[in-house]
Image: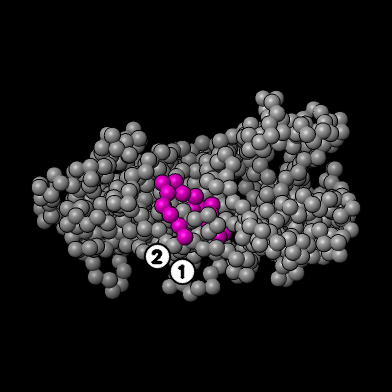
Amino acid sequence: MLPLSSLIQVNGELTNLPVYLSDGQVVVYRKGWYGIVHTDFDLTVAFDWNSRVSVTLPSTYAGAVCGLCGNYNRKSQDDLQMKNGQMTKNPNDFGQSWRVAEIPGCVNGCKGTCPSCDITQKNQYQTKEYCGIINDPKGPFRDCHAKVNPTGYFDDCVYDVCLFKGLQSSLCQAITSYTSACQDAGAKVYPWRTDKFCRPSCAKNSHYEVCANGCPATCHSLSAPVGCQNLCTESCVCDDGFILSGEQCVPMSECGCLYKNKYYKIKEVFYPSGLCQEICTCQKDGKVECLKFSCGANEECKVANGVRKCQPVGEATCSASGDPHYISFDGLRFDFQGTCTYTLAKACSIEGDSHLTAFSVNVENEKWGNSKVAVTKLVAVEIYGNTLILKAGKRGLIMLNGVWNNLPVSLDSGTVRAYQHGVNVIIETDFGLRVTYDLVYYATVTVPGNYRNKMCGLCGNYNGNRKDEFRLPNGKETSDIRTFGEAWKVNVPGVVCSHGCDGSTCPVCDKDKQAIFEKPNYCGIINDRKGPLAACYNKISPENYFSNCIYDLCMSEGDTKVLCHSIQSYVTACQTLGVDIKSWRTPSFCPMTCPANSHYEVCPEVCSTTCAGVTDISKCPAQCAEGCACDDGYFFDGEGCLRIPDDHIYPNPNFNPNPNLVTGWHSSQPIP
């Protein structure tokens, strides 16, 4: 609920706090729940890594500023001055005029009808059990009312809690904001949190205090950062004998290293020159060990996602769809109808290459429908000693090392993440591997460019040459697809399966049926130049998907489910590349059946509207992915959409008995 963070981005690069910039002209440090930016001319910006930000200016800036905070001319009636200098009475127009960036999913004001609260709800949330605790004259903030007017905080609290239907985490955030304002003003705040009400989640070797030292000692320096006022501040405090190392409380003996006035934790790796020509590691004795270094093939030194390192150049995607039809990393299309378990993609010949991480992706196929068609039944990803399995029909669930978990899931501080995105589940890693599966028909594997020439399996070797894709595990080549596929079989004891048809034994589509299925009301919608998918043709040729659709529809005797999943696979591929796909489904053509309290959208916000996303900031893809969106007021719990009455269902989003595993939703229901 209350994140303990000590990382910020400086010029795009993640850096441990505290940070001293420009010879101390700018200092960034942590104070309580907040990150503070303080300058030598007394500008102070505070952010709680969640939703509250404040800006404090010296009086010398009176009348010399602009933006959402106003012009600071001590006249509140002209604060809604837009960027063009004109005044407005419309807060929405005012806010939009100061927008500085286009952010995926960003909307101008409310999306649809703005939410509102009825009088009954307002009365409930104004009581002392909710927001009324803020302005209660006998409550824990009684000594603050004379210093910080509680009215605005109370009104904001009622609005936010009403918006989230009484969700306790939104209530706690609102009360925390007033707590911070009171303590910044020097007012005493009495204990207000309990084990059942807004209980803070503190990291290992730390505990909560309502009146903690606002400028705690850190491994960087035992003294307070310049500009930090040692006011009473509620916070998580390191236990006796421990000290802050980045975001963790560690024994003094486990403090890291100072290198050019920047702090690095033990075992932290960094590139001091910014060119990746030298790699340095912080050792246990506080010393920094540096070695000469260079990026590998298909890599370049740059900052990505806040980390400077040798980043891959480019990427390639392999797909398996339908009966299964494969498109290799190098773009070769072939069919292999085996119903066993196979290695789809695997990192090969990477021994001794410190740049690359070992992984494998296996798929299990099965016969479907009338048994003439085979589809992917299971996708298994082996990475970092973990096995993650997605199984057909298991919506909202992922098996991790033999145990079912609800989505989303994050391992080892985000090195591996799995989450729902539209109709697909995505598994992605910190080095750029991305696996998707729609739990029915279509699976993809995307690998970063530094795995070029280092891949094997049904997806090929990713060397840019389509002519040598059918390489066996022993390195030899074959021209026979069945021999190639059978060679990559993964033996599963007790499982009976086959490697499908071979050449002339494979069924073919009747010409009369083919003529019917080529029409726009069948597979023809895929390559209809005037159809809803035409915008994608410049990015992905529709021909492979069109022919796959016709074949699968023939083999399934015109099964509309096969038709719809086949078209959907092309839509997914297009949306992954950022193509704006128009609505192609209708009530009579491939309607998508959505769970209760949800509806279909071409570009839904599933990832960010999960139950986990209510209390935490979700990292979601920028691209659209069609699927079911929860109705207003409902949130996705991994399987369906539900209202969240309060935090007794989701008491502590940060608690988990396994600290390396964070699941997005703690369900009281048995998991199959």
| 607 to the left or right of 503 | right
CA gap, disc 1 to disc 2? 10 Å
Callout 1, which amino acid? Answer: Trp
Considering the image in quadrants, where does the C terminus appear?
Answer: bottom left
Q: Which residue lies under the disc numbered 2?
A: 394
The vertical placement of 422 against 13, above or below, is below
- Along the viewing direction, whichever of 428 and 125 lies nearer the viewer: 125
Please provide the residue range marked out in magenta. Answer: 597-612
- Along the viewing direction, whichever of 2 and 500 lies nearer the viewer: 2
Residue 37 on the magenta segment: no
Residue 655 lies, in percent from the top left, at 63, 66
The local crowd at label 1, few if under 14, some if 14 to 19, many if 20 or more residues have their Cα within 10 Å, is some
Taking the spot 10% from the left edge, 50% from the top edge, the residue there is 510
Residue 226 lies, in percent from the top left, at 85, 43
Taking the spot 75% from the left edge, 34% from the top edge, the residue there is 79
Q: Which residue lies under the disc numbered 1?
A: 404
Q: Residue furthest front?
A: 119
The vertical placement of 330 against 669, above or below, is above
Residue 606 on the magenta segment: yes
| 600 to the left or right of 465 | right
Question: Which of the two discs, 1 and 2, labels the residue nearer the N terminus?
Answer: 2
Contact between labelled residues 2 and 1, with CB atoms less than 8 Å apart: yes
